[in-house]
Image: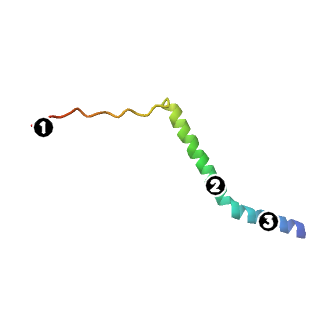
Amino acid sequence: MQHDTASWLFETALALRVFGPDVVRGCRRLLTAGVRVGITQLTGARTPARATEPDREAP
């Protein structure tokens, strides 16, 4: 193994170790946002109507 190859492997492993968690976190946020957009499109971009309870008269 040459010195250049060893240093390249070390730098690549270090970059994955340093930036890997941030990349995973970013991908999760993008997937979560995509799911939210998908759900909104499936429901027709309407917020669910809140059912009102009938007014009860006190005895």
Relative side of 13 to 6, left or right? left
Say which mark, if any, is on residue 25: none
Bin the neighbour count of mark 2 within 10 Å (Cα to Cα): few under 14, some 14-19, many 20 and up. few
**Image position, residue 10 (x, y; %):** 79, 67
Q: Nearer the viewer, mark 1 or mark 2?
A: 1
Residue receiving disc 3: 11
Query: What's the CA distance linking mark 1 and mark 3?
Result: 75 Å
Q: Earlier in the sequence, mark 1 or mark 3?
A: 3
Which SS class for mark 3? helix
Say which mark, if any, is on residue 24: 2
Query: What's the CA distance linking mark 2 and mark 3?
Result: 19 Å
Q: Quadrant of residue 1?
A: bottom right
Give the farthest residue toward the top. Answer: 44
Residue receiving disc 1: 58
Which quadrant is home to the C terminus?
top left
Give the farthest residue toward the left. Answer: 59
